[in-house]
Amino acid sequence: MATLIKLYGERNTNTNYLSQLIRLNLEAGELRGVVPPAVMRLQSRLPGEEWLRDLYFAMTYDRNLGWKHSWAEPAKRIARCTAFTDNDLVFVTTTKNPYSWLWSLFRRPYHQRGATKPDFMTFLTSPWLTVGRDRITHRLQSPIELWNIKNSSYLQLPADRTLHTTTERLIADAEGVIGEIATSFAIPRLAEGFTDYDSSTKDPAKDKRYYQDYYLNERWRDEIPAEAVAVINATVDQSLMARFGYERLT
């Protein structure tokens, strides 16, 4: 039985890039984490922007364990799902530095509900209204809380079947990440070498070298004002940051 990978990672954490790398390098399938194209086409013809996608994942959760950007259920709940019991299933999660992630979400607020885009400080201190497939039932006080909740949920996944990585590590050493996935779960490689995907899935004008410079040299720090850092520091889960290898900015 071929291994299936369930990928979880918030918006703007390079999940598309990681999916491409898995497809190009590993003899493994990926459990569905986005809606099929037919559902997208149908949604575009219907009123509203999210409800049909929410309905799709609500109805198919047992088979696919939800949207790739969703809150991850605890291991005991997942163990009862067909996706887990009927497959050789493993999990890979991606996490991004909360400061740069919040700046990315501000610039590209995928699935943000609301008519207007606020300034960054207002964005950081305003409620984030989730969609149904986020699998979060209570009102979030801010997008900072979204980072806390989503990334802490990844630690609930079955520990012996889960590998946690970060956007920064993926950008710095994609080959190493793929090698670690292959080794950790005994997944055969498609070929002896490594095949990279040297293209942005969001902006074709930005290649891998751009992202390596921007994130590994932390160019994003120049774009985040000091008062915004203070707001983030007041809410972000510092212990969770440390768990994923991030340091508090001052």
Image: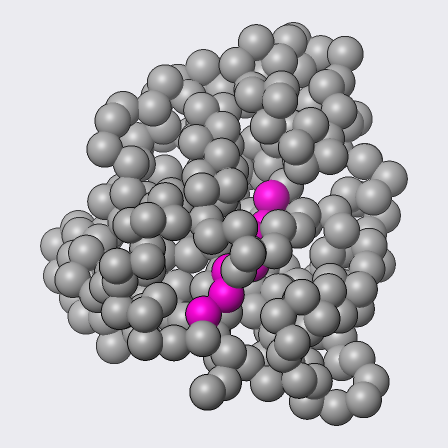
Is residue 229 placed above or below 185 in the rendered structure?
above
Relative vertical location of residue 50 with respect to residue 137 in this rendering, above or below: below
Going 62% across and 13% down the picture, which residue do you hit? 233
Residue positioned 46% across, 64% down in the render: 6
Query: Residue 131 occupies which quadrant of the picture?
Result: top left
127 left or right of 143 in image: left
Q: Quadrant of residue 170?
A: bottom right
Q: Position of residue 78 (x, y in %)?
A: 32, 55
Residue 191 placed where, x, y %?
75, 90
What are the residue bounds of the magenta stretch? 89-95
Q: Is residue 94 magenta?
A: yes
Magenta stretch secondary structure, dominant: strand
Front residue of 152 and 16: 152
**Residue 241 at what x, y percent from top left?**
64, 28
Q: Which residue corresponds to the image point at 75% horizontal and 18% vertical from the top-left?
A: 249
**Residue 20 at x, y percent in the picture:** 60, 73
Q: Identify the image's colour scheme: rainbow, by chain, secondary structure or one colour.
A: one colour
Q: Quadrant of the C terminus?
A: top right
Relative side of 109 to 178, left or right = left
Q: Report whether residue 224 is seen.
A: yes
Q: Residue at x 68, y 73 (%)?
A: 182
- Tell whether position 187 is magenta: no
Q: Is residue 109 visible?
A: no
Q: Is 214 situated above or below 236?
A: below
Residue furthest bottom as drawn: 191
